[in-house]
Image: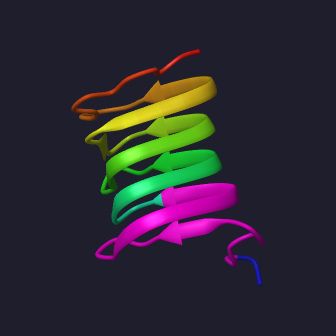
C-alpha cells in the first residue's frame, strides 16, 4: 500500500495524544501531541505537532513545537514557531 507507514516507524496523527516512553527504530512523525520521552532514528515534528518532553534522534526537523528538550546527533532544523527550552540542537 502506497500510503503505509514503513516498518519500525511511528506516526502520531493530528488530534492524537500519545503519553509515555517511545523507542522508535526508524522515523517518527508527530502531527498530534507527544508527552514524555521519544527516541528515534529521525524525528519530524510537523506544523500541527507538539512534543512535550525529551526527544532524541540522529536528526530532528521541527515545523511545530518542542516544549522541553531535544538532542540531535547529526543535524537539526526548524521552521516556524517552536521550542521552549530547546537544548543541545547541534552536536
Check the image and report above or below for 88 versus 43.
above
Task: Say left or right for 12 vs 3.
Answer: left
Q: Which one is nearer the viewer's eye here, 19 or 13?
A: 19
Which residue appears farthest toward the bottom when viewing the image? 1
Point out residue 35 in the picture as x, y percentages from the top left corner: 32, 60
- Quarter of the C terminus within the rendering: top right
Residue 24 on the magenta span: yes
Check the image and report above or below for 23 versus 85.
below
Residue in the picture at 30% in, 56% down: 48
Q: How is the image coloured?
A: rainbow
Point out residue 2 in the picture as x, y percentages from the top left corner: 75, 77
Part of the protein shown in magenta: 3-29
Residue in the picture at 36% in, 61% down: 34
Residue in the picture at 33% in, 27% down: 86
Question: Which quadrant would residue 62 be assigned to in this image?
Answer: top left
Q: Which one is nearer the viewer's eye here, 44 or 39?
A: 39
Question: Which quadrant would residue 64 be assigned to in this image?
Answer: top left
Task: Say left or right for 21 vs 80.
Answer: right
Point out residue 71 in the picture as x, y percentages from the top left corner: 51, 30
Task: Say left or right for 52 vs 70.
Answer: left
Residue in the picture at 34% in, 71% down: 14
Check the image and report above or below for 38 versus 12.
above
Point out residue 38 in the picture as x, y percentages from the top left corner: 50, 54
- Quarter of the N terminus within the rendering: bottom right
Residue 21 on the magenta span: yes
Number of labels in the image equals: 0
Amino acid at each position: 500500500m502506497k500510503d503505509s507507514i514503513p516498518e519500525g516507524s511511528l506516526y502520531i496523527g493530528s488530534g492524537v495524544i500519545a503519553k509515555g516512553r517511545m523507542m522508535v527504530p526508524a522515523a517518527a512523525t508527530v502531527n498530534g501531541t507527544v508527552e514524555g520521552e521519544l527516541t528515534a532514528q529521525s524525528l519530524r515534528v510537523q506544523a500541527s505537532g507538539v512534543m512535550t518532553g525529551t526527544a532524541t534522534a540522529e536528526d530532528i526537523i521541527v515545523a511545530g513545537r518542542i516544549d522541553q528538550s531535544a538532542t540531535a546527533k547529526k543535524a537539526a532544523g526548524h521552521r516556524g514557531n517552536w521550542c521552549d527550552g530547546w537544548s543541545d540542537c547541534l552536536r
